Image (cartoon, coloured by chain):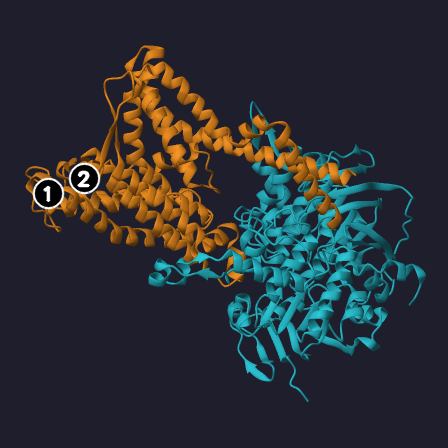
Chain colours: A orange, B cyan
Amino acid sequence: MAKDEKVLSSTSNNMHESQKNQFELKWFLRKNIVPVFFFVLCVIGGYYSGLPLPFLLNEIITRMARNSFLVISLIIPVLAGMGLNFGIVLGAMAGQFAYVATVNWQMAGLTGFTTTALLSIPLAILFGWLTGILFNHTKGKEMITGIILGFFANGIYQLICLYFMGNIIPIKVPSMLIPGSIGLRNTLDIKPMQYALDNLLKIQVKIPGHVFPVSIPVATFLAILALCLFTHYIVKTKLGQEFRIVGQDMHVAEASGINVDRVRIIAVILSTILAGLGQVIFLQNLGNINTYGSHVQVGTFAVAAILIGGASVKKATVGQALLGTLLFHTLFIVSPLAGKNLVGDAMIGEYFRVFVTYGVIGVALALHAWQSLQEQRRIALLKADISGE
Amino acid sequence: MEAPRLEMRDISKEYFGNKVLRSVNLSVAPGEIHGLVGENGAGKSTLMNILFGMPVIRNTGGFEGRIFIDGEPVEVNSPYDALELGIGMVHQEFMLLPGLTITENIKINREIVKDNLLSKLLGKKLGILDFERMRRDARKALDRVELNIDEMLPVLGLPVGFMQFIEIARELDKDSLRLLILDEPTAVLTEKDAETLIEVMKKLSREGISILFITHRLNEVLRVADNITVLRDGEVVGKLPSSEATIEVLAELMVGRKVDISARARRGFEEDAKPILTIKDLHVDMPGERVSGLSLNVQEGEILGIGGLAGHGKIGIANGIMGLYPARGYVHVANYGEVELNSPLSALSSGMAFVSEDRRGMGLLLDETIELNIAVQALLSRGKFLKKYLFNMIDRESIRKHALKMIKDLDIRCTGPNQIVRRLSGGNQQKVCIAKALTLEPSILFVSEPTRGIDVGAKKIVLDLLLQLNQELGVTIIMTSSELAELRSICDRIAIIYRGRLQGILPVDASDKEFGLMMAGELSAVKEGVF
């Protein structure tokens, strides 16, 4: 039996090598089917949308700056074997609560933004800790638990914002409250803090042949770069190693003396903190908060983006997160116009946008499932070949 | 005299009133290789779980007795305590992470880190892994087990033999290691790898590490061990230096005669008379119970026992034929033809039925009623109990009638056919499983581990029931069991499986020695009539 296995492993390596050499392109496509598929969609959509290049680039850069942080926050839980953390919705809530506080204190500019960011951290730690405890009781079902937790937390969030704010929690700024009542308004204006980070350092790049320049929020991208380096660093530490070990096999981790539950809680807390910061960055770009809506789809969008980048519930890298953000938001920008231009109805365009968001999650998951099925078949075939001798 | 490295004194353990260890004494000297042999269920694992502080022991009420390491009384409350005391264990199942490299596996949770600013502020966990030093350590440990392999290769895809050595290297890398427990280390190894392992064990013992070697392979234990302890039914039945032991003595001690063979006359079944079931070159890919190239003929009307040690594939046979695990090969049923493998439906329609060893998982819908459990398989695969209108409707009345009959015939103790199966005792659940299989009116019935997890009184009832089915209804029964005594009490002949293949078929009145030897793979000794 052991001999069979030896033959198997060596043959499988050989097969792998030869496949790689002979069908370089096919191998590449098969390995990266998900991003390639969405890249093709983006190109087709971009062509039919008829958008001028500088506009498209500006939109893409804005959205990259806005969303990358949130998407990258998903990586650590994947590493720790907990799948895609839909619970980052709670991180987003932490960011929004922090804004409520700083707007209430009438803070502005970079000071206001920094205070908001710092304030979101302790809240995110608390939320992440609670999420982690819940996930430890629902091992193996973290993703669905995360989705439902998002709905449940939204209920409590609404209770706090609608009933406690201006009632139990004093609000000094009357314009934040629903006129003549208690509770926060639908839209929370954070104009004093808008672009606090984006405008810190901004460069304009002229594109030959076009009038409008493309502007790049350098400071925001530096923050994202710092986050990438941080994630990269965490992966290389002993803590990162523990994430990986727990992610691969909790039983083995336990037998080697690792406190599995603790490691998992740390992973969720880190993810929630990053999501909180991500939401703070996201909202400073928008300039206002949809009090009861801004956080709701954060999880879905981030998950869709990272999946498009080629990540799966078992493996995710910074590169996949960035690529995914790029492809997802390009598609998000071009699909309504492309839909409109192809079919000739503005409503259809809007339908395309919604369809894209949810559709991509389905398509990406299906493509991943297809990929792993192919892999299983390949192994099964190899095994049959060998034991047939 | 030097204090023994390990001494376990008067160890007793009960699981829910069932004594699994009775005053076991075990003593291992420094640098000694001590063999521990015994059948499945003899209490070896429980003893090792106690020594290694596994939570399962504490959760079931702890144990009696005391443990001494180097003469000092110790408390082992968790695997962590055991590691602190210098006890290392290579588990029967692999404790390796396939996605990581060999180095990472050897240094698991003992990684070496480089300090940096963050790690100084927030603790060692934020230090970056020092792969250079980890590699050097891993290399050293691998050299000690004479494994010449690149330490940065991923474990995935390595031959199983290598994995065993990596596990040992991992234990050796712990500087404090004083006692190494090897649980069935040679079970998955080829002859050559096993040979190397024995050499490595001897080398380690010369370095002063004590080794507790648990195995079924009697020839190996004889070659390598200094002393041997034999466990049977939770008791030490023999303790002897290996110079005084022979394979025959060990085999006899290990198996022992537990139950008198009932007086029932055994029918002689010739190997090539008229097989109702023909199996040729069957391979089943059931994890942990792999069948690799089994050929066997089953005669009409017999009760064939299938025995063998755990992990050798006896459980895989029925699961493979019934289509529950991926299988290939040739299976032919008389009056039906070739059975399509990997298709439970085909297996069922050929007249075979299966009472699974995984009663609660595979065999029963625990939260459904007794009557539905009895009827469900026949309903789905045979279209029984259906009223055929435009749509097929379940015929509750006929199900109820049938269930009541089964409850009466098999003496299922319950409050009524509406009772939920989860609330039944193990023995009665097993009867429901059998009733379910009988509802298919099978000509061949596979029964796996029919008495596992049920109390002694119920065991006899279940076995008698099987016998009755065979004699009164003429059902051919193929019974798989880890308990030899059980097989002997009702079977006509007993096939012994070793490493996924048929090792031989013995009559029930063959001696303990013959069974013991055959299970341990010493077929040649049986054939040559050494005993």
Q: Position of residue A322 (x, y in %)?
A: 38, 36
Mark 1 residue element: loop
The amino acid beneath tag 2 is Ala
Residues at marks 1 and 2, CA–CA distance in whole angstroms:
29 Å
Indicate whether A79 appears above or below B481.
above
**Which residue is rendered at x = 18% and y = 35% of the image?**
A288
Mark carried by residue A113: none
Task: State whether residue B438 appears in this view.
Answer: no
Could you tell me which chain the residue with mark 1 belongs to? A
| Residue A42, quarter of the rendered image | top left
Q: Do labels 1 and 2 touch, CB within 8 Å?
A: no
Graded by Cα atoms within 10 Å as few (under 14), some (14 to 19) or many (20 or more), the crowding at tag 2 reads many
Foreground of the two, B320 or B89 = B89
User: Would residue A345 be found to the left or right of residue A101 on screen?
Assistant: right
The amino acid beneath tag 1 is Ile
Foreground of the two, A312 or B396 = A312
Q: Position of residue B517 (x, y in %)?
A: 83, 63
- In the picture of the structure, the residue carrying the numbered disc 2 is A196
Q: Position of residue A181 (x, y in %)?
A: 8, 40
Indicate whether B337 appears above or below A78.
above
Q: Position of residue B277 (x, y in %)?
A: 82, 41
User: Would residue B478 be found to the left or right of residue A109 on screen?
Assistant: right
The quarter of the image holding the C terminus of chain B is bottom right
**Which residue is rendered at x = 37% and y = 63% of the image?**
B123
| Residue B320, quarter of the rendered image | top right
Task: State whether residue B81 appears in this view.
Answer: yes
Foreground of the two, B384 or B185 = B185
Indicate whether A33 appears above or below A252.
above
- In the picture of the structure, the residue carrying the numbered disc 1 is A182
Label 1 or label 2, whichever comes before in sequence order: 1
